[in-house]
């Protein structure tokens, strides 16, 4: 695989070691956490800890979604989760999925929050405000910056498909990242599995730039179509995220075993098409 510094190198190494392109999304919802875990002092952390321990063999990274913690006032449990992964599974990078997007001075604070306060290896960001809103994240050596490009939700077409200069907006984003923002080799693009034709188009534009691909599992994206459209010649080039399809694969006392089985199954399915 192509050598790259920092976050991308760590991600490549984890993918090779575990033969996996699976990103496990850690999006806890108290209503879905088993009762015996909810009774513990830090139930969200304890739920996450068990998920991580069960799935680490079959994953290449983890992606906690910030809103699932902030809405519950559980930022301390998010921090505990990230620290646990870094201490117990240091080869598996953590992507903080916060999708921040603001003017440069505020973006600098969001970058500090992501990389210093939480110690994330990478963060998702929204490019709508342009270059000065992304630059503060790029100033953190070795940390990953994952830019929204063609998102997996149905409403993505509202703006991302608008044309300017003969190209759709997502195409402009992809080209800007590949040609200008990725000078240090630590950028990725968010491209949804629910839009395989766009996946293939963007891959043709950006070369080997890696993708974070949401939309498989609960969102219904087709694994085979996504992998065939987004993979690179070396069989990498992307990680596919599943959150609900893994962490809520089963309930009760066996929830972690069910998550393990779901992660392994997704890994094996992806590998059929690499």
Image (spheres, rainbow, N blue to C red):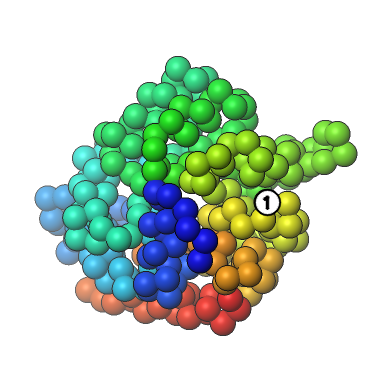
Q: Position of residue 273 (x, y in %)?
A: 60, 78
Q: Which residue is mark 1?
A: 206
* Residue at the far front in the pictured view: 3
Q: Nearer the viewer, residue 171 or 3?
A: 3
Seen at 70% across and 42% down, the residue is: 175
Seen at 24% across and 67% down, the residue is: 53
* Residue at the far top in the pictured view: 105
Q: Position of residue 233 (x, y in %)?
A: 63, 69
Q: Position of residue 158 (x, y in %)?
A: 73, 40
Q: Quadrant of residue 112?
A: top left
Packing grade of label 1 (10 A; few <14, some 14-19, many >=20) is some
Q: Secondary structure at mark 1?
A: helix
* Residue at the far left in the pictured view: 41
Q: Position of residue 101 (x, y in %)?
A: 52, 29
Seen at 44% across and 20% down, the residue is: 106
Q: Is residue 38 above or below residue 60?
A: above
Residue 243 makes an appearance in the image: no
Please indicate whether residue 33 sits to the left or right of residue 234 in the image: left
Please indicate whether residue 81 sits to the left or right of residue 188 in the image: left
Q: Is residue 16 above or below residue 82?
A: below
The C terminus: image quadrant = bottom right
Q: Nearer the viewer, residue 217 or 176?
A: 176
Q: Is residue 52 above or below residue 190?
A: below
Q: Quadrant of residue 156?
A: top right
Q: Is residue 144 above or below residue 201?
A: above
Please indicate whether residue 35 sits to the left or right of residue 67 in the image: left
Seen at 67% across and 55% down, the residue is: 207
Please indicate whether residue 121 sits to the left or right of residue 254 in the image: right
């Amino acid at each position: 695989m192509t050598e790259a510094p920092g976050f991308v190198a760590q991600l490549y190494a984890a993918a090779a070691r575990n033969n996996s392109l699976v990103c496990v999304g850690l999006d806890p919802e108290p209503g879905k956490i088993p009762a015996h875990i909810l009774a513990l002092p830090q139930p969200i952390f304890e739920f996450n800890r068990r998920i991580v321990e069960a799935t680490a063999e079959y994953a290449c990274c983890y992606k906690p979604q910030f809103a699932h913690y902030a809405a519950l006032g559980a930022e301390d449990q998010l921090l505990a989760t990230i620290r646990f992964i870094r201490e117990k599974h240091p080869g598996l990078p953590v992507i903080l999925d916060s999708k921040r997007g603001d003017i440069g001075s505020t973006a600098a604070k969001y970058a500090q929050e992501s990389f210093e306060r939480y110690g994330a290896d990478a963060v998702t960001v929204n490019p709508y405000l342009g270059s000065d809103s992304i630059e503060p994240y790029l100033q953190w050596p070795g940390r990953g910056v994952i830019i929204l490009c063609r998102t997996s939700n149905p409403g993505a077409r509202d703006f991302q498909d608008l044309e300017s200069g003969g190209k759709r907006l997502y195409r402009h984003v992809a080209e800007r990242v590949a040609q200008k923002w990725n000078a240090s080799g630590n950028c990725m693009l968010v491209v949804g599995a629910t839009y395989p034709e766009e996946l293939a188009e963007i891959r043709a534009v950006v070369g080997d730039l890696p993708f974070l691909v949401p939309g498989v599992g609960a969102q219904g994206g087709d694994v085979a179509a996504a992998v065939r459209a987004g993979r690179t010649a070396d069989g990498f080039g992307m990680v596919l995220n599943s959150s609900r399809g893994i962490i809520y694969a089963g309930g009760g006392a066996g929830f972690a075993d069910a998550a393990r089985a779901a992660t392994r199954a997704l890994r094996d399915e992806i590998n059929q098409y690499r």
